[in-house]
Amino acid sequence: MRSIAVFGSTGSVGTQTLDVVRANADRFSVFALITYCGIEKLIAQAKEFKPKYVAIICSKQKANAETGGLSVESRLPKGTKLLVGDSAVEYLAAHKEAEILMVAMLGAVNSLTCILAGIRASDSMVRDSTAGVGSAGNVSSGFGKIIAVASKEAYVCGGDLINEALSKSKTAKIIPVDSEHSAVYQLLKGQSTNGQFYSGQFYSGQSHNGQGVKINGVKKITLTASGGSMYGKPLAQLENACVESVLKHPKWNMGAKITVDSATLVNKGLEIIEASYIFGVSEMDVVKHKKIDFVIHRQSLVHGIVDFVDGTTFFNISAPDMRIPINYALGYPSRLSKSAIGANIPNVSLEQLNSMTFETNDDNLLKGVALCLRALEYGLTAHLNFANDILVERFLKKQISFLDIYKGLENVLEHFAKKPKIKADSLDKIVSINSIITEYL
């Protein structure tokens, strides 16, 4: 029995994680559920899963929920403790009873805090477990905390911090949950007979022993993109795109923010940056040599492609359902049956393979990837991430147009490219960048 803490339990990935947990009550227990402001849904989840802790990050939302009514504490099941505020994230991520951390929160700072706290606490959790204190479910598999990361913003803003922390840990294991990164991770891991990547061309910042290992003979990594709701639309339609049309994603069931990011292709650009940190590809190899690239694949059946130097190309293919990569991360290092996901998700058929298409983004109307690569080249990925958060929120509130998102990002990059660089080498500096961008916009 493995104990799970779900950071962002009321969001899209969080609720789908609980779908998998619900279908595997004999394998997983819920230690903690954490939300930013989804209080009613959190209370309902707590009543079902009866965690030891629930946490509400936004204290103002807790106060609002209690105005003229019952306290949140009084509505929780017996034995469930309530924590409030940002400090709950670090406390619960580091807790020795939290064996698996599902990091699915919006926002770079709290996500990064969660990941770093989990990595740093992993080795001590193993020491406690071998001494008979706490749970030993992960330890028997040869590692400490499993940190399942669905919050790409943490890598975009603090990838160096994550890899530095991993290099000092002997037991922590990060498993990517984004479907594309999970796909590439599985393709690369599948080349090793001992569960680690071979030595070779690309550098990876993590391994079972916490030291970097290398991946043998990889020529190129390609992430696929559905294209979102706006791909292929003429300029006039992009200029007048309304919120409702942008949020109609053709394939994936996701939250509003990531659905807009998918439409602008900013999401794919952020995923390329994230992949560069997870798989250890240098900025130069990404920006200049396209060692990590993307392709438009409208059917969303292929999630990742790896080309090897010997002419071999591997594809990862599955139905477009986030519960598949979630299932992989929670079950790691074993593969759970797809029936354990709690839904009838069929394997991709040969007939579906026959209809697959792949396209490049030749019209350049959707500038998201290009802007992200420019940010990577300028050393402004955190700046771009925080600016995008603000601009997408304004679009969802109908304060700016769809194409204004691009204009705002271009403005931020060109402005801060001329300013002294703030290196995102600590949480404090990342918080400072966030404040600077908020003030600028």
Image: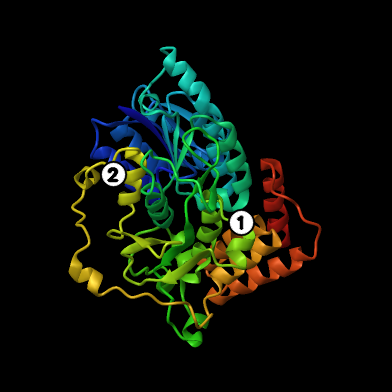
* Snapshot quadrant of residue 147: top left
Q: Is residue 84 visible?
A: no
Give amino acid for label 1. Ser
Q: Is residue 155 visible?
A: yes
Image location (x, y in percent) of residue 228: 41, 70
Image location (x, y in percent) of residue 81: 43, 25
Way the structure is coloured: rainbow
How packed mark 2 is, by other alpha carbons closer than 10 Å (few <14, some 14-19, many 20 or more), is: some
Q: CA distance from mark 1 to mark 2?
A: 37 Å
**Residue denoted by label 1:** 282
Compared across the picture, whether 300 is left or right of 66 comes to left
Count of labels in the image: 2
Give amino acid for label 2. Asp
**Residue denoted by label 2:** 19
Disc number placed over residue 403 in the picture, else none: none
What is the quadrant of the C terminus in the image?
Answer: bottom right
